[in-house]
Amino acid sequence: MIRTLRLRATFPAVVRGHRAMGTTAQLPSPEHAHGHLPSSTSPIISKLHFFNSVMEGGKQIPTYRVIDGAGQPLEGAAVPDIDEALARRIYENMVQLPILDDILYNLQRQGRIVFYMTAYGEEAAIIGSAAALAPDDEVLAQYRESGVLLWRGFGYDNVMNQCFGTHLDVCGKGKQMPVHYGSREFHYHTISSPLATQIPQAAGVGYALKRDPARLGKNCAVVYFGEGAASEGDFHAGMLLASTIPSPTMFIARNNGFAISTPSSEQYYGDGIAARGPGYGIHTVRVDGNDVLAVYSAVKEARRLCLEEGRAVLVETMTYRVGHHSTSDDSFAYRPRKEVEDRKRLDNPIVRFRLFLESRGWWSKDEEEALTKRVKQEVLAAYKKAETLPKPELKEMFTEVYGGEEPWNLREQREELARLVKKYGDAWEPWKSELKKHKGGGKDLLE
Amino acid sequence: MLKTLARIHRSGRRWQSTEVHPAPAGGHLPSIATSTFLKPTRDLALRTAGLRYVDQTEQDPAREMVGRETRKMNMYQAVRDALSIALTKDDTAVVFGEDVAFGGVFRCTMGLAEEFGRERVFNTPLTEQGIAGFGVGLASMGHTAIAEIQFADYIFPAFDQIVNEAAKFRFRSSGNFDVGKLTFRTPSMAVGHGGHYHSQSPEGFFMGAAGLKLVIPRSPIQAKGLLLSSIRDPNPVIFMEPKVLYRSSVEQVPMDDYEIPLGKAETLIRGDDLTIVSWGTPIYHCETALKMLSHPPPSLAPHVPESLRSAKAELIDLRTIMPWDVETIAESVNRTGRLVVVHEAGRIGGVGAEIGAEIQKRCFLKLNAPVRLVTGWDTPVPMQYEKFYMPDPIRVLDAVVETLTY
């Protein structure tokens, strides 16, 4: 039984940053002002007044929503113009995520892969935004956004090969931990573990797009990050650069309530991430991240503003991290199981959208069964293929550290390892069995 | 006659003035002016070893020199010249950093914003981590990103972007992405009054970041050629410019587009008795020390044994710190049997330690003395004590004498 979640205010909360901030309720009106500072439109006032919120009267920035918990449009909401084909594609992509996550999470638990991160609960934020972008907008993600890559056609084989670190891992030849995907073909920059580093990089990517006559006005850089990563200095740097230089960069904050065990109440004191946007003078919106239609609409509009003005735009998607941070985390150590179960039940992004589709006659129970069965089969088939594949050739460990000529230290170290493998490969057990897992069994080193 | 005197008086010019002028902010090293390593004439400049013109058509270097022009430049003018060539020849090239638009605090970007426009030469807000991240993003898209970090002392906020991101960008994506087109330029080393935060040589911190290259020029000709090589090298490079040399090193510099190869040290003085390796400002102190070895001034004569005054030391400028030219150094030490490494950075974790370890491995049986390091002390650079902190000619001379007599 889904309890409908009602929200009175339905107006889109687009907060435009201005150099001359609007007055709050307590400030005297501009007619009583005493002019301005030189080269400034900041009005002079004679009453000492402190302010601490973006919205009037200390209220929080409102959250934009289109459909309620029963999949019904809110009064006054503008349902985005999506045809059935697009709606189904969005839904199917949302449904696939937890199915994929279930299988890979369990593979980690069984020791088949070493690590994994799920995206439970955030399917609407990820797929809704992915659907609103152009397929060649440059995406710089954090780690929970592989749905964007799958939306673009990455495929389960590539996912499996990266997670298993096989010799067919196109992302990085087994050099990085699982879920560190990347693809030039799909304009998805390779994930790195340090948080928020991608944020100022996105400002630079955006500038490259601006300087490229073939892409100016057509593409933007899109950077995803969590509300925890937004505490890093790199967040401030990235927002500052993209707003000031400026460059066409869209900032999408996934506010899912947790940074590992740290709840957002311990992450920031202000009104979330959205409150920071006006500090940089940029267009900002907060949206219900579990309402895929709201996310789609907001990101589409944000993208339009971003390209039109060539400047940073901030979208904060409010959602909830249903799963653990990663396979190295047990979130029930810091939050009650009931809280998670309630959230899954009461505000399920997939269910909300399904109800919307069904109300349009665009989905049925039979199709649901067929879809889940098909996705599961495809994922398992990809797993079966990847499971048997060997790791890359051992010599790959030394490749692509540098471009151009290989420096002497790497050449000598590779030769040193070759000598050691030749001498001890059969005699030293950890190496003996490990060599068998690599394509070529280490013999490639000896060439 | 009286009118002339009055005119001279009114013009404000004071004959035989005893006024003291403050040292320029970027420092001043007058001893460099007489260095034989700087090329004061066109002919000498064009004979610079290892210089490769980008438009070279002639196989014979001698014929190459015929039509080439040079111009007198100091190091900041040479850097500016290199940037101008990069911006002219590469439409994707952009130069950015704090205060670069008006010309830069050391004038390395004078006139570039006017010439190439504010879209290509622009100021960034005050954020080194932002500058570095922005450069990584730009370069990842195949654009030539030339970022300035105003002082090497302030590169540390960018350490994460440089070491965790830029250096690993190619490896972690197996070549799908790379930031080969990223170059950082940053003024480094001591000026005499810089203290903790305007004097550092941080190359030691970056040596371990596999995937990164580090380059340090000693002169205007070297700076221009090495900078153009760094910009065009398919790897992220940190180009550290010894700031005291910006104004103090002056020579005739070829005006054309030329490169000097990375990864290659240069032997400045040939000798068979001892090898000295250094880079940047201390190169000139080594030159002075060797002059004092062969012709010690009267006050130092008692400290330089007669038998040593005919010793011939080999002086090598490393130029590229990472990857460093181990072959040139090892070949030299195998011949001389003695090595002294000189650098301004502190002893622990400094580049000298890495060179020492590798050379003792390669030349162990040929060594006649332990590898000797002449470095800054392991303290932050102390303002009023700099003359005793930096490796100056007397410390190099002392190390050379001790190593020769070991």
Image (spheres, coloured by chain):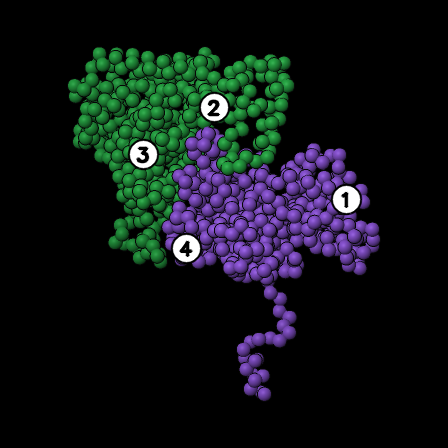
Chain colours: A green, B purple
Residues marked 2 and 4, same chain: no
The residue lying toward the viewer, choosing from A22 and B335, is B335
Chain ID of residue with mark 2: A
Chain ID of residue with mark 1: B
Residue at 35% over, 45% down: A211
Q: Where's residue A309, x and y in %? A: 29, 45
Residues marked 3 and 4, same chain: no
Q: Which residue is mark 3?
A: A136
User: Left or right: B330 with respect to A289?
Assistant: right
Q: Which residue is mark 4?
A: B113
- Residue A290 vs B370, above or below: the answer is above
Chain ID of residue with mark 3: A
Distance of label 1 from label 2 (alpha carbons) = 49 Å
Mark 2 or 4: in front is: 2
Q: Which residue is mark 1?
A: B403
Given the image, on which type of amino acid does mark 4 rest? Answer: Ala
Q: Which residue is mark 2?
A: A174
User: Left or right: A176 with respect to A153?
Assistant: right
Q: Reading the chain from its start, which is encountered first: label 4 or label 1?
A: 4
